[in-house]
Image (spheres, rainbow, N blue to C red):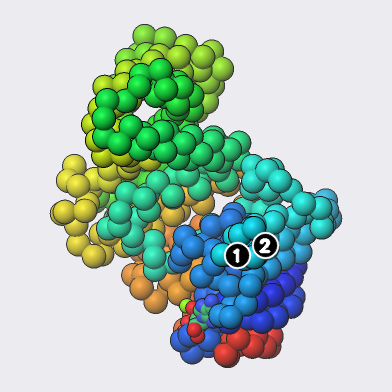
Amino acid sequence: MIIESIHLTDFRNYRRLDLDVGPSVNIFYGFNAQGKTNIIEAVNVCSCLSSHRTSKDRDMISFGEKGFEIKIDLLDPEDNYKTDLSVSYLLEKTEKNPSSVPKRILKQDSLQISKVASYLGICNTVIFAPEDLNLIKGAPSVRRKFLNLIISKTSPSYFDLLNRYNRLIGQKNACLKSFRGGRPDDDKMDFWDYPLADISAEIILYRYRYSLLLSKYASKHHLNISGEKEDLKISYSTIQGSVELINAFLKENASLDSFIDGSAQKAIYVPIKAMLSEHLLSKFRATRQNDSERGITGTGIHKDDLDITLNGLPMKNFSSQGQQRSAALSLKLSELYMIREFCRTSPILLLDDVFSELDVNRRVSLISGMVNAQIFITCTEREYIEKELGSLVNGTSLPRYFHVENGNVTPE
Ligand SMILES: Nc1ncnc2c1ncn2[C@@H]1O[C@H](COP(=O)(O)OP(=O)(O)O)[C@@H](O)[C@H]1O
Ligand SMILES: [Mg+2]
């Protein structure tokens, strides 16, 4: 899919924007704080419902307004199929509820889509931004979000699982609080813990498989970027004993490789999920008293993380700025290549202010991942980027330049 035009209403510093864009490289340049990143953010939100800058949708509403809308017109150049996607986010006040209740509406071709899983994956994007550094330095939630997004983009039904998990954990926590720190009622808690164990097992299987894949890809990219010097590894950290259990099962019944490439998926899925689910249930039961005292669930996949090591040492504690930048880029390139391989098409690339911070090796790696994709780039200096992208620009698809100033976008 490529984007033909972008339409914004009350999004950040755009009251209204209608912009036709080019099929290959689109460059947005201008001084700081003019609205360049806002455009890239809007495209990302409309395609995968996630902002790289905020987890609060309401932050993106133009100051003083009650909602925003982003619409993108899309074209599949292979078969000339056209479609459009839109996401609107409204703060509504009703008589019953005078404080604003947020409401998100997703549409394709003006028809409302109620399931997020049916919306995700129609148009995929991968964004590279300075915030990527948080993948290495930031809180576990950053890495969970990263992993969740890769899985959702390639297996949209995963998103439904996450939603169901979040609803259930909220209900379980409400139930926990009702015991006010006292002894929790086992039957009442089992009512929540059975389905939670089941869904958690499914999520863990997804996350484990994808983190193995991610590690494979990232290690390859990082070797390239570091001149074959550094060994980057990513391992999945979740509820104690789960990964060991899966590994033991795979050793007996299938190979790890067939688990990773998905070929053994159907045959092993049911028994492995049942075993894992039982293991999780016993963990949830063991922490009940503790959870009740704290009024919140302490053990669960909402605490998952990815452990990232470089030459065997945890990156968080033992890496330089440069190594962190390279590792973050390796992770993002892995996302790009995984989506390419799983979906068999190139996602749209969004590059927010990234070139100036990369050294030669990193720039070459990034640019080599950019061929044959529609690309949106923001930068402050037009000349710099023009030189940098020389290798990408071949007579057939000239880049388009847009000057951005105070929420006005002028195509050249
Ligand atoms: N919710 C909002 N409503 C209106 N303006 C906003 C909102 N959020 C950010 N802005 C404005 O957007 C501008 C920053 O846009 P951004 O795209 O990040 O700039 P840059 O061109 O540097 O990438 C700032 O002027 C900021 O005040
Ligand atoms: Mg910016």
In the picture shown, does residue 338 fall above or below 248?
below
For the C terminus, give its image quadrant: bottom right
Residue 276 appears anywhere in the view: no
* Nearer the observer, 389 or 273: 273
Residue 98: assigned label: 1
Q: Nearer the viewer, residue 174 or 317?
A: 174
Residue for badge 2: 95
Identify the image quadrant of residue 348. bottom right
The vertical placement of 48 against 283, above or below, is: below
Residue at 45%, 26% (x, y): give it.
192
Quadrant where the N terminus is found in the figure: bottom right
Q: Amino acid at mark 1?
A: Pro
The x and y percentages for residue 84 are: 77, 59
Can you give x and y, in whole percent of width and height, for residue 48 in the image? 59, 54
- Left or right side of 305 for 6: right
Q: Is residue 21 above or below residue 87?
A: below
Q: Which x, y percent locates residue 138?
A: 30, 57
Residue at 57% over, 45% down = 153
